Amino acid sequence: MAAARLFAGLMSGTSLDGVDAVLLELGAPAGASACSGSLRVLGHVQLPMPPALRAEFAALNHSSPDELHRAQLAGIELSRLYARALEQLLRAAGVAAADLSAVGAHGQTVRHRPELGYTLQLGAPAWLAEQCGITVVADFRSRDLAAGGQGAPLVPSFHRAVFGRDGADLAVLNLGGIANLSLLYADGRVLGFDTGPGNALLDLWAQRHLGRDFDADGAWGAGGAVLPELLERLLDDAYFRLLPPKSTGRDSFDARWLECRLRGFEAARARDVQATLARMVAVSVAAELQRHMPDVGELLVCGGGAGNLDLLRHMRELLPGCELLDTRSRGLAPQQVEAAAFAWLAARTLDGLPGNLPAVTGARGPRVLGAVYPA
């Protein structure tokens, strides 16, 4: 039996709401199933994204003046935030930095253009390794892209290891800024892809009209009415019609995208637009489930959107035969899943094991992911 090892995962997702740091104890080699108690969360810390850094990352989704210089500074600032989160995580758990095998640091995605062969996650992993004295694994996506893949999503391999079960189909939905599905089939097959916007547009609209970072529990949107004509326009995007492998980002579904589709709806109540955005997310997810796993009986939800009760209500209406549960029912809190996934992927990198699933990303084959920055 392999000795337990400690890994940390650092994740700042497409919602731009903050950083999640998770400390994992892996009681089995990273190549084995993480089920049956071999994976244990020892700690979780969340730090909010400073408003100025959030605004800078949002601006860097598109070409802008002096962007190379600004991107480097933003990456360093993010790594400072990562370092603070990691310090708090280890202190709360009573664990020394020297006890960690590695940290998986995802970085902040600001451009995702797999059709052009690149994706860009900002960060300063060498700085982080130097500052924290811990081996850092970063740049998880580019090797899959070099092998002809999308570079995303990478979490389905982790979902299979942690949540997979024999004898029944299961779907896992991550509701981040962009939503992605992992479809775990009873016969062992795995399919995964981004369905389109998740929280990103909902948060954007709430920030504009509520002056808050997000619509807590979806309560504001729940009081609105879905606008059928606007919903039809929102869903009339070529991405929703693509077959997997497919992935997308905030540089595709952003404020400009939304403003273009709101032309002619200037008189609509802001609350009704919010309700319609929630319905769009739910319809896009439900349509993909009905297309690729029509008989699924259980959908596990994770990510920040797992707390949006209005969004979940829409999905329950659209998927009446499917039970919606959050991942806490399987031992991982919704906000811990992605950071835990990159801790697990860092373990696979150090063990020389592939982290991608070619059936998900479209890569030519399994690849060991990530670049390693030794302590």
Image: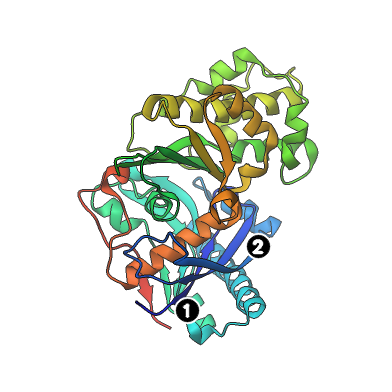
Q: Quadrant of the N terminus?
A: bottom left
How packed is label 1: few (under 14 Cα within 10 Å), some, or many (20 or more)?
many
Question: The residue under label 1 is which amino acid type?
Answer: Ala
- In the displayed structure, 367 sits above or below 238; it is below
Local secondary structure at mark 1: helix
Question: The residue under label 2 is which amino acid type?
Answer: Gln
- In the displayed structure, 102 sits above or below 227; it is below
Tag 2 or tag 1, which sits nearer the N-term?
2
Q: Position of residue 275 (x, y in %)?
A: 69, 26
Name the residue: 36% across, 45% down. Answer: 166
Name the residue: 69% across, 32% down. Answer: 310
Q: Quadrant of the C terminus?
A: bottom left
Name the residue: 53% across, 81% down. Answer: 132
Disc 2: which residue: 46
Q: Nearer the viewer, residue 117 or 37?
A: 37
Q: Nearer the viewer, residue 365 or 325?
A: 325
Q: Position of residue 217 (x, y in %)?
A: 73, 40
The residue furthest left is 364
State how the image is colored. Answer: rainbow
Report the mark closest to the observer, 1 or 2. 2
Disc 1: which residue: 129
Find residue 323 and report its image quarter: top right
- In the displayed structure, 221 sits above or below 33; it is above
Q: Position of residue 155 (x, y in %)?
A: 42, 52
Local secondary structure at mark 2: strand
Name the residue: 26% across, 54% down. Answer: 146
The residue furthest top is 229
Mark pair 1, 2: CA separation: 20 Å
